[in-house]
Image (cartoon, helix red, strand yellow):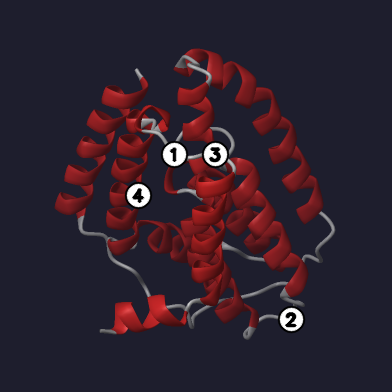
């Protein structure tokens, strides 16, 4: 019932659905041959795997570990931005942002820093890092299959951009003060190692099946 209530109250969903129906009728009628089944299958597999990682608190664990190790405000922001950058390569930009931004907002209550600019940097880092892998962003999956790109060709194009953008993220964190911090309020997060190991094995199989 809660899911149905949310669907019926989501105005953006109804507007997008109406626009999709109208364009399908008057502009480009849908055809079965237009559906890229490989993209849909890889996207579905990717989203299921990502939800499992999210359920296992994979990103939260490393975020908690890194922030506990941070000695200064600058170091903490750089750690979270780096985690967002590299985490989005595997867990997508959306999941990374929805995990790390609320976490940082919780941390910002205990440190002397305006949360606006760190949140912008974390969000930028997640979006920029997601460009590196085919499964970091759903658009990448479409580009990979639509233009029939090989995985090697994809990485040849994405690697230079990734290196430049990570350097830009690193330089942007240099503008924050090196105020000393000591975080003890963040609760510890435990990993379910057997479940995580099985999930990693399934991830490798899916990657091998769809992209190699």
SS of the residue under disc 4: helix
SS of the residue under disc 1: loop
Q: Nearer the viewer, mark 4 or mark 3?
A: 3
Q: Are marks 4 and 3 in contact (CB under 8 Å)?
A: no
User: Which of pointers 2 and 1 lies earlier in the amino acid sequence?
Assistant: 1
Give the label on residue 104, or none.
none
Measure the alpha-carbon separation of dots 3 and 1. 6 Å
Residue at position x 28%, y 60% in the image: 56
Give the label on residue 47, or none.
4
| Residue 138 rendering spot, x and y as whole percentages | 49, 42
User: Which of pointers 3 and 2 lies earlier in the amino acid sequence?
Assistant: 3
Q: Residues within 10 Å of mark 3 (few under 14, many from 20)?
A: few
Residue at position x 35%, y 51% in the image: 50
Q: Which residue is mark 3?
A: 28
In screen coordinates, is 204 left or right of 170? left
- In this rendering, is residue 65 above or below 102? above
Q: Observer-nearest residue: 190 or 147?
A: 147
Q: Observer-nearest residue: 18 or 92?
A: 18
């Amino acid at each position: 019932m809660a899911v149905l209530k949310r669907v019926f109250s989501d105005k953006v969903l109804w507007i997008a659905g109406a626009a999709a129906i109208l364009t399908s009728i008057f502009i480009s009628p849908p055809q079965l041959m237009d559906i890229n089944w490989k993209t849909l299958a890889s996207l579905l597999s990717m989203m299921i795997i990502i939800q499992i990682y999210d359920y296992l608190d994979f990103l939260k664990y490393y975020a908690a570990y890194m922030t506990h190790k941070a000695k200064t405000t600058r170091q903490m922001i750089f750690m979270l931005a780096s985690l967002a950058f590299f985490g989005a390569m595997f867990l997508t930009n959306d999941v990374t942002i929805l995990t790390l931004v609320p976490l940082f907002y919780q941390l910002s209550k205990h440190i002397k820093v305006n949360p606006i600019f760190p949140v912008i940097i974390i969000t930028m880092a997640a979006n920029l890092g997601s460009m590196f892998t085919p499964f970091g962003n759903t658009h990448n999956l479409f580009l990979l299959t639509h233009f029939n790109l090989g995985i090697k060709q994809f990485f040849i194009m994405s690697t230079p951009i990734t290196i430049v953008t990570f350097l830009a993220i690193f330089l942007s964190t240099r503008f924050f003060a090196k105020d000393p911090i000591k975080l003890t309020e963040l609760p510890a997060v435990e990993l379910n190692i057997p479940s995580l190991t099985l999930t990693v094995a399934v991830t490798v199989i899916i990657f091998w099946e769809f992209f190699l």
